[in-house]
Amino acid sequence: MASDKESTAQTEGEIAGPPPFVVWVSGDMDLDHSAELRSLLFDGVAQAPHGAEIVVDLQNSSFCDSTGLNHLLAARQFALDRGSTITLAGPSHQMVRLLEITDSVDLFGLAPAAQRRSV
């Protein structure tokens, strides 16, 4: 039988799991950039392993209109269909406000900006 200390260490290791799959968004998420944004989000979700935590890093995006929000919501549904979740990292004040106004804030996890890892 394992001691409590060993058991706790194993449990913590299992909870940590693999690192999240990050999709980096930059620029405005609006009608003018609709095709690029949709492609970026859907390609990112498709490339992530099934069941992965997907982080959409928004630290380099300061504006989002209804078109951008609709693409985020559609990507969220695509991710859910694949057993994944989407967290929005580093959203601007405007983005958070848009999520609040549209009652969408609870549909996404919110987190600080992701850190890029050198390969």
Image: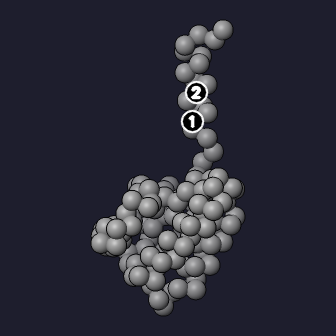
Between 104 and 88, the one nearer to me in the picture: 104
Q: Confirm or deny contact between disc 1 and disc 2 (CB under 8 A).
A: yes
Q: Quadrant of residue 100?
A: bottom left
Report whether 67 appears left or right of 42. Answer: left
Q: Position of residue 71 (x, y in %)?
A: 52, 77
When the figure is inspected, residue 33 is found, relative to residue 109, above or below; the finding is: below
| Residue linked to disc 1 | 15
Badge 1 marks a residue whose secondary structure is helix
Q: Is residue 22 among what the camera can see?
A: yes
- Identify the image's colour scheme: rainbow, by chain, secondary structure or one colour: one colour
Badge 2 marks a residue whose secondary structure is helix
Between 108 and 35, the one nearer to me in the picture: 108
Neighbours of disc 2 within 10 Å: few (<14), some (14-19), many (20+):
few
Give amino acid for label 2: Thr
| Residue linked to disc 2 | 11
When the figure is inspected, residue 13 is found, relative to residue 78, above or below; the finding is: above
Q: Residue at x 60, y 75 (%)?
A: 40
Neighbours of disc 1 within 10 Å: few (<14), some (14-19), many (20+):
few
Q: Quadrant of residue 74?
A: bottom right
Give amino acid for label 1: Ile
- If the image is split into quadrants, where does the N terminus sit? top right
Q: Residue at x 39, y 59 (%)?
A: 106
When the figure is inspected, residue 100 is found, relative to residue 16, above or below; the finding is: below
Q: Is residue 28 among what the camera can see?
A: no
Q: Quadrant of residue 113?
A: bottom left
